[in-house]
Amino acid sequence: MTIDSQIMTLQEIGDLTRRALSACGASGQQLELAVQSVVDAECDGIRTVGLNYLPLYCGHLQVGKLKGDAVPMHTPPEVLAAVGELVAEEGAYPLDL
């Protein structure tokens, strides 16, 4: 048995990934970060999280395991520490940060 293969440019990989994920409900930053992740993986030769994983990403979007319009956030450690102190002052269990 032979497996046909096709050489794709990184632009083509990005376009294919964007179309597939968009059709499954990804949008905004979630879409762009996922596309870049797949392109980067393919560029680095990491096939397990590149195009080979694209059907799983799409399936997870379709069944709700991934939120298609999620907005990535970063919470600085000092904010997390302040929240832990606030919780402790309010009588709840303090966070061990």
Image (spheres, rainbow, N blue to C red):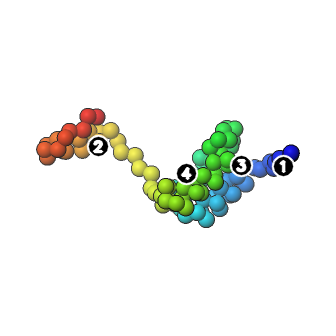
Mark found first going from the N terminus, 4 or 3: 3
Mark 1 packing: few (<14 Cα in 10 Å), some, or many (20+)? Answer: few
Query: How far across and down, in percent of the image, does residue 79 sit?
Result: 29, 43
Mark 3 packing: few (<14 Cα in 10 Å), some, or many (20+)? Answer: some
The disc placed on residue 10 is: 3
* Residue at left offset 65%, top offset 41%: 48
Tag 1's secondary structure? loop
Query: How far across and down, in percent of the image, does residue 84 sit?
Result: 23, 41
Mark found first going from the N terminus, 3 or 1: 1
User: Which amino acid, by three-letter code, is at mark 2?
Assistant: Val
Res. 29 visible in picture: no
Instruction: Give the residue pinned by disc 1.
Output: 4
* Residue at left offset 58%, top offset 53%: 57
Mark found first going from the N terminus, 4 or 1: 1
Q: CA distance from mark 3 to mark 2?
A: 38 Å
Question: Is residue 93 depicted above or below 70 in this figure?
Answer: above
The disc placed on residue 33 is: 4
Mark found first going from the N terminus, 2 or 4: 4
Residue 87 in the figure: left or right of residue 97: left
Mark 4 packing: few (<14 Cα in 10 Å), some, or many (20+)? Answer: few
Q: Are marks 4 and 1 in contact (CB under 8 Å)?
A: no
Tag 2's secondary structure? helix
Tag 3's secondary structure? helix
Residue 25 in the figure: left or right of residue 85: right
User: Which amino acid, by three-letter code, is at mark 3?
Assistant: Leu
User: Which amino acid, by three-letter code, is at mark 4?
Assistant: Leu
Instruction: Give the residue pinned by disc 2.
Output: 79
Res. 33 visible in picture: yes
* Residue at left offset 58%, top offset 57%: 59
Query: How far across and down, in percent of the image, does residue 6 sit?
Result: 81, 50
Q: Nearer the viewer, mark 3 or mark 1?
A: 1
